[in-house]
Image: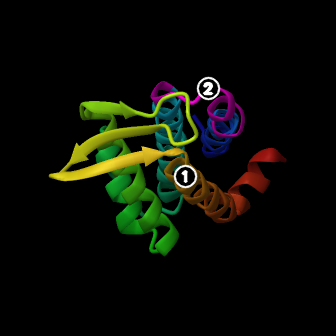
Amino acid sequence: MSMLEKYRESVEEFKRVDHLYHVSLKYTRTVDIIRSAIERIISTYENSVECFIEFLKEEKLAPTVPDNPVGKAMIVLENIKSKQVETSMNLYLKLRRIMREPYGKREEFRRHVTMTTELDGEKLEIDIDKIKEYYDITTEFLSFLKKSIEPYVDSEEE
């Protein structure tokens, strides 16, 4: 799959995050919706990482790429020096770990619906405000990705 296709998949997946955040969470305040939003954010990052991997191959900066998603994220982190990429890849890796942990629910069907879990001995509480923070980081990352691959996007569209 081409760099442009991966980018478009990232954007399409993020549209689903957008809907979950702005519509679903507003009307259905459950931990299941929070988890769905996190899963879609992870999927957005997976496609974005694939896009960056294609970019790095084009630039001949990543001759060998591991098959696993974490390895690919590490290649992106090593080769693209940007605070935005660092923040986003750390979030992506953290969210992947969070989704594997057992979780609890608090205040479902209320404004302060919260998913609770533990990661590295630290208690985490993920609520609507935290999802908004993840949403904003991902929005900025997609903008950075678009700017990074723009020269390639223009040539592919011709």
Residue name at image x 46 percent, y 30 percent: 31
* Residue highlighted by disc 2: 28
Q: Position of residue 70 (x, y in %)?
A: 31, 46
Question: Which element carries disc 1, helix, strand or loop?
Answer: helix
Residue 108 percent location from the top left of the image = 48, 29
Q: Which residue: 60% across, 40% down?
A: 6
Whether tag 1 and tag 2 are in contact, CB under 8 A, the answer is no
Residue 31 falls within the magenta-colored stretch: yes
Q: Which residue position is annotated with label 1? A: 129
Say whether disc 1 or disc 2 marks the residue closer to the N-terminus. Answer: 2
Q: Nearer the viewer, residue 118 or 139?
A: 118
Q: Is residue 27 magenta?
A: yes
**Measured along the vertical axis of the image, is residue 47 above or below residue 85?**
above
Q: Is residue 28 above or below residue 97?
A: above
Residue 90 shown left or right of residue 85 in the figure: left
Per the rendered image, the range of residues in magenta is 21-32
Q: Amino acid at mark 1?
A: Asp
Residues at marks 1 and 2, CA–CA distance in whole angstroms: 15 Å
Q: Residue at x 37, y 59 (%)?
A: 90
Tell which of 155 and 108 is nearer to you: 108
Q: Quadrant of residue 11?
A: top right
- Residue reaching furthest to the left: 121
Q: Position of residue 50 (x, y in %)?
A: 49, 44
Which secondary structure class fits the magenta region best?
Answer: helix
